[in-house]
Image (cartoon, grey):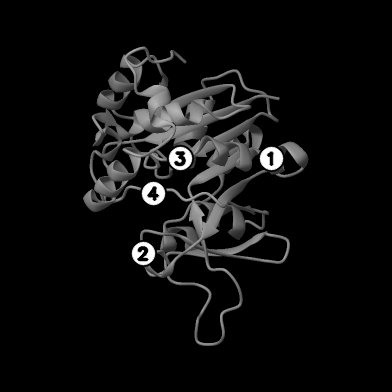
Amino acid sequence: MRVVVGIPARMGASRFPGKPMAKILGMPMVEHVYHRCALAKGVDEVFVATCDDVIRDAVESFGGNVYMTPPDIPRPGLRVAEACKAQSLADDDIIVVVQGDEPLVDPGMIQLAIKPLLDDPTLQLGTLVSEANEAEWNDVNEVKVVADQKDRILFMSRSPIPSRTREEIGPRLKQVAIMPFRKKFLIEFQTMEMTPLEIAESVELLRAIEHGLEVRAIRSPFRSISVDTEPDRLEAEAAMAKDKYFPDYSGAARPKY
């Protein structure tokens, strides 16, 4: 069984056009994500899935693996699924989808994400979740999560859930966009019909939930910064200046993957 990380990236993001190429300490954001995923123990390969020549050229310039995909793919996981079709991957290989807007992704987050699928061969997919602070809970760019007692996700929304009209019932959770899939299921997921709640919330994992499938909430203690706006980029840049992993890949002699 192999573990492969796929990073979907496109220039046409509605909230921050061109963000995969936005510079953080002089390096495109997608390059930060690539190198940091490659630092994770147990990862056999990393690739970028894109529909944009400028991203392809950037990834190739630092020696990364990149696959071109059609421009009309609506969801990040589906873009990675399309790229997987061009590769020789076994059905039970684990594909970890890591959004290209997570420049401070900790390698430990990848290791945390794959563990449940390594431990349980019947589990098909999951996503990291972490506690949401007040600002994140009210931010429509953050996807909130509610799960049952066995960490099976019940619903995901851009609205603040669960309700706070009564006493708080526990930690408020948000999605961290690191999603492990079995390769066979990821390809099948691509063929499933889009669902009403998925469309309403613009959250692709709701497709699996609405089709009656288990999506595991994998609780993470790590804090990261998703870049959806220019202020987010500035916050990420300030954090990167103090980051312990950045010196490992920021030198002139960059590793070839």
Q: Amino acid at mark 3?
A: Val
Q: Earlier in the sequence, mark 2 or mark 3?
A: 3
Q: Earlier in the sequence, mark 4 or mark 1?
A: 1
Residue that badge 4 annotates: 225
Residue that badge 2 annotates: 140
Percent coordinates x, y for residue 68 in the rendering: 38, 24
Q: Amino acid at mark 1?
A: Lys
Question: As displayed, is residue 138 above or below residue 45?
Answer: below
Q: Earlier in the sequence, mark 3 or mark 4?
A: 3
**In this rendering, would 50 be left or right of 116?**
left
Question: As displayed, is residue 199 above or below residue 100?
Answer: below
Q: Amino acid at mark 4?
A: Ile
Residue that badge 3 annotates: 105
**Spatial distance from mark 3 to mark 4, Cα to Cα?**
8 Å
Percent coordinates x, y for residue 251 in the rendering: 34, 18
**Spatial distance from mark 2 to mark 3, Cα to Cα?**
21 Å
Graded by Cα atoms within 10 Å as few (under 14), some (14 to 19) or many (20 or more), the crowding at tag 3 reads many
> Image quadrant of residue 41?
top right
Q: Earlier in the sequence, mark 2 or mark 1?
A: 1
